[in-house]
Amino acid sequence: MQEISLRDFQQHSEELVQLGIKQSAFASQIAISRNDGELLEAIARQLAGDPMIASVHIYDRYGMPLTSTEPTASEPAEQTQLILVEPIMAEEQTLGYVEARVVRQNLLKAPQKTYQFLTYYGQFLLFFAVLAGIFATTTFNRLRYRNKV
């Protein structure tokens, strides 16, 4: 059960990262058409601000780098990375590419915390329900025997 939930959480996290990259590619379309390097750097920094993303690179249509962010220093190089590439399109013409390197271990950090949080509170509510049941049972038993005497 837990493996299925975590797999679903990982798939959902990957979809969220892909949507973020698509949004960045759409925003980069304007920056490339205006030849605005500062805007491209801001877009790359904003995307790299996501804790799941290790680094971001934006290339022109010929593969020449326009801007990039440095990989996060806290992430060891031997961790498994997922490389996602999204084309930057304008009127069916490719202007460039956004490449984001996602650390797979970071994809499951937030879902695992959420899963642990929900499990903890589920156990708490179950314990509270048992206590409420015991309290209700003893109260009704007292009332029942009090009326018989």
Image (cartoon, grey):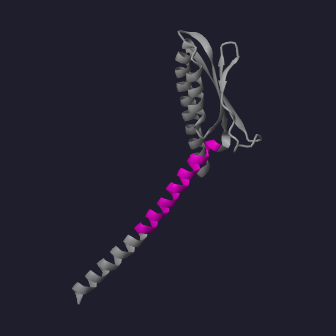
Answer with left or right where residue 103 lies relative to residue 89: right
Q: Nearer the viewer, residue 112 or 58?
A: 58
116 up-or-down from 100: above or below: below
Residue 147 horizontal/vertical position (percent): 22, 84
Answer with left or right where residue 127 lies relative to residue 40: left
Q: Identify the residue at image location x=52%, y=16%.
A: 30
Q: Identify the residue at image location x=47%, y=60%.
A: 121
Please, what is the dominant secondary structure of the magenta stretch?
A: helix
Image quadrant where residue 22 sits: top right
Residue 85 horizontal/vertical position (percent): 64, 24
| 31 in magenta | no
Q: Identify the residue at image location x=59%, y=51%.
A: 2
Furthest residue toward bottom: 149
Q: Identify the residue at image location x=74%, y=43%.
A: 76
Query: The C terminus is located in which quarter?
Result: bottom left
115 up-or-down from 10: above or below: below
Furthest residue toward right: 78
| 108 in magenta | yes
Tell how many labels.
Answer: 0
The residue segment tinted magenta is 106-129
Residue 68 horizontal/vertical position (percent): 66, 27
Q: Nearer the viewer, residue 60 or 118?
A: 60
Image quadrant where residue 145 sits: bottom left
Residue 59 horizontal/vertical position (percent): 66, 19
